[in-house]
Image: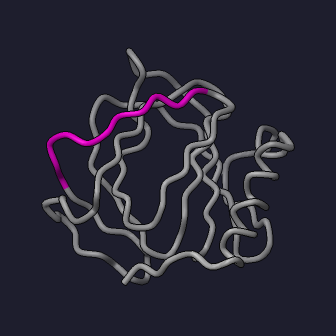
Amino acid sequence: MIKAPDYETYRKIHKALDFIASGKADGLEAGRHELGDGIYVNVSEMETRETGVFESHHRYIDIHYPITGGERIITADEAALSVTKEYDDDADYMLGELRGGDEFTVRAGQPFVVMPGEAHIPGLCVGKPEKIKKAVVKIPV
């Protein structure tokens, strides 16, 4: 069951957005970096792709933040998915398929928030595949 955010969660969201706005994420090397309060950031260099599968989380808010390049992200209600991998509580994710969803283009320097229960396909190419560097800040709820 997904719970509604409380003030502590809002405080953590503000802390994560302040971290992004400070530019500190831009210089981080690939890997996991702890920010405190259970918040961490995964930095990766990846090749965007044309297709993907929906993923969804229950215990974390994700802030996707392209550092270089851009990506498309498709979102949908988790309840609308045809589940291909049941929710794994230890790993905090499930996978599914759906035709459609809402599509967004996220460019370098633009944070994109994904809430628990919001299925999403990140890392899709804008035009043609390209190498990008991105951070995903994970905020526990």
- Above or below, 70 relative to 31: above
Locate the C terminus by quadrant: bottom right
Task: Please tell me which residue is depicted at 61% across the width and 63% down the height of the picture.
Answer: 138
Residue 6 position by quadrant: bottom right
Question: Which stretch is magenta?
Answer: 97-107
How far across and down, in percent of the image, does residue 136 sit?
60, 52
Q: Tell me where residue 83 appears, x and y as whole percent.
A: 17, 65
- Relative horizontal placement of residue 82, taking residue 16 as reference (left or right): left
Q: Nearer the viewer, residue 78 or 97?
A: 78
| Residue in view at x 67 percent, y 33 percent | 67
Residue ID at (23%, 74%): 86
Expressed as whole percent of the image width and height from the top left, the position of residue 79 reads 22, 65
Residue 89, by quadrant, is bottom left
Helix, strand or loop: magenta stretch: strand
Residue that sits furthest to the top in the current view: 127
Find residue 85 and report its image quarter.
bottom left
Where residue 77 sits in the image (x, y, percent)?
28, 58
Residue placed most toward the observer, 47 or 105: 105
Q: Where 95 sits versus 73, above or below? A: below
Q: Quick one: quadrant of the N terminus? A: bottom left
**Is residue 96 located in the magenta-colored stretch of the structure?**
no
Q: Is residue 17 left or right of residue 70?
A: right
Magenta-colored stretch includes residue 101: yes
- Measuring 38% from the left and 69% from the top, which residue is drawn there? 93
